[in-house]
């Protein structure tokens, strides 16, 4: 059944949308057209000049209204000095006052939060918190941006929210290391990631990204964090190579980059790399001690002190065998029965037992039972047949379908011919239970929270701490 809306309704919706767009355009002009502005703000430590309209901004909070329309100097001169508000935060404040989309991204949200709290703009403060809790479905890039901005501007992010961020980082390790923002991430976050066995990424991919990150960080010292005190040491003599991964940095920065990479090296699983990759891409960045240790392992299988041999295992959950048995007739009126599981399981087999077709001297008997049945799970279908045992008519017939799935599923469909349903007694499902990755990650974060959660006061800390 399709409800046909009147043509007049569609025209009305289109007219309303056109009017809304026109209104937004006019409101945007309040920001872009200085001729319409009646006051000026000097924003940030540099006191950047930003013209604005007083009346809409005064409606945001009482402190702003008092400053702009009271008997203070700001009211007389129509000049507002906001050294503790960033240009981005003031732009969000204006857009909110002008009834425009705030256009939040993590840095703007963090800086706006600080300004909204300072000037008692409660609804804007709540909007920013809601944005940070969602981050477009907790996108990996946005999480890295948020943690980095908090560290750069010493913003105290609540522990609960940080735990949510780190849980998503660990459950999406591959997307984190491939994120475009990885090379712009704060060193305090990078230092935590490389230590984690639960950060399940390919070691060669991680090394390549760390080389890119270190090249970026030596050019932007505010990103170095705990690696800021990396001291260049005398480089080991190495074979020349035509490979150029300098990332366009100066020779002096290259020396510092290698010092940063050598600080990271105790946490790298070099023996998990391909030998050729280590020789071509890694060796030139390391000191003699690290080179000799890895080379000894590759040539002799010898494990030197300090050489990490364990893999990054990722999130591991104890495998629990689960069984579910149901009477088929109780909740099945048609040829198909759908079983819903309380949580995803990795199915291994489904077993069906026949129902007695008669009685012999008061005992149930199973005569002439023969039918084909199938199960479907994860868009795959598996079939088998049931037949009674002519030599033992007092035992129910059983039929088992072995299932081999790559991923857990949360439902199973059993299909039996409608005229054979009365011959089915019970169905038993066996599989392995796993926790969802995010749930596993939450357990890890709770266990490691003291080491994982970033602090606004973090300065140049020892990355080995």
Image (cartoon, rainbow, N blue to C red):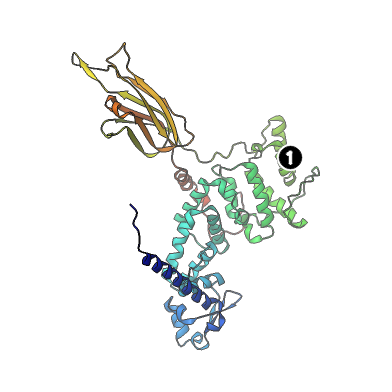
> Looking at the image, can residue 455 be seen?
yes
- Against 60, residue 279 (above or below) is above
Percent x, y of residue 135: 49, 57
State the image quarter where residue 337 is shown. top left
**In the shown orientation, is residue 150 left or right of residue 280?**
left
Farthest residue, direction left: 362
The residue located at (57%, 53%) in the rendering is 189
Percent x, y of residue 75: 49, 86
Farthest residue, direction front: 7
The residue located at (29%, 34%) in the rendering is 334
Frontmost residue, 282 versus 233: 282
Q: What secondary structure is marked by label 1?
A: helix
> Looking at the image, can residue 158 be seen?
no
Percent x, y of residue 251: 77, 56
Frontmost residue, 461 versus 286: 286
**In the shown orientation, is residue 68 left or right of residue 400?**
right
Q: Residue under circle 1?
A: 279
């Amino acid at each position: 059944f399709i409800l046909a809306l009147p043509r007049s309704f569609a025209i009305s919706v289109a007219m309303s949308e056109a009017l809304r767009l026109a209104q937004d355009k006019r409101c945007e002009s309040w920001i872009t057209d200085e001729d319409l502005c009646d006051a000026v703000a000097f924003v940030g430590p540099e006191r950047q000049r930003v013209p604005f309209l007083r009346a809409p901004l005064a409606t945001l909070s009482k402190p702003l209204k008092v400053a702009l329309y009271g008997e203070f100097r700001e009211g007389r001169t129509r000049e507002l000095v906001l050294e503790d508000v960033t240009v981005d935060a003031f732009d969000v404040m204006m857009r909110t006052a002008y009834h425009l989309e705030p256009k939040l991204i993590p840095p703007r949200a963090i800086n706006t939060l600080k300004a909204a709290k300072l000037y008692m703009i409660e609804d804007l403060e709540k909007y920013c918190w809601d944005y940070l809790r969602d981050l477009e479905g907790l996108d990996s890039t946005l999480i890295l941006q948020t943690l980095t901005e908090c560290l750069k501007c010493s913003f105290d992010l609540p522990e609960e929210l940080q735990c949510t961020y780190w849980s998503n980082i660990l459950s999406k390790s591959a997307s984190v290391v491939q994120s475009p923002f990885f090379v712009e991430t704060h060193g305090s976050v990078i230092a935590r990631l490389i230590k984690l066995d639960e950060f399940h990424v390919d070691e060669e991919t991680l090394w390549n990204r760390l080389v890119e990150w270190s090249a970026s960080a030596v050019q932007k010292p505010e990103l170095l964090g705990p690696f800021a005190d990396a001291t260049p040491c005398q480089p080991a003599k190495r074979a020349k190579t035509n490979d150029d991964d300098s990332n366009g940095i100066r020779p002096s920065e290259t020396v510092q980059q290698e010092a940063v990479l050598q600080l990271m090296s105790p946490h790298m699983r070099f023996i998990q790399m391909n030998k050729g990759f280590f020789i071509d891409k890694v060796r030139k960045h390391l000191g003699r001690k690290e080179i000799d240790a890895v080379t000894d392992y590759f040539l002799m299988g010898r494990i030197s002190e300090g050489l990490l041999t364990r893999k990054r295992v990722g999130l591991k959950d104890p495998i629990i065998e689960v069984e579910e048995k149901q009477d088929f007739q109780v909740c099945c009126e048609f040829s198909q029965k759908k079983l819903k599981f309380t949580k995803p399981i990795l199915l291994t087999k489904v077993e069906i037992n026949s129902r007695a077709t008669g009685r012999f001297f008061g005992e149930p008997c199973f005569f002439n039972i023969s039918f084909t049945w199938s199960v479907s799970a994860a868009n795959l279908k598996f079939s088998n047949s049931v037949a009674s045992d002519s030599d033992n008519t007092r035992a129910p017939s059983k039929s088992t379908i072995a299932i081999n799935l790559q991923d857990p599923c949360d439902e199973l469909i059993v299909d039996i011919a409608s005229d054979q349903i009365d011959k089915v007694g019970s169905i038993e499902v066996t599989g392995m239970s796993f926790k969802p990755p995010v749930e596993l990650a939450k357990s890890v974060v709770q266990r490691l929270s003291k080491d994982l959660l970033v602090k606004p006061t973090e300065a140049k800390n020892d990355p080995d701490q």
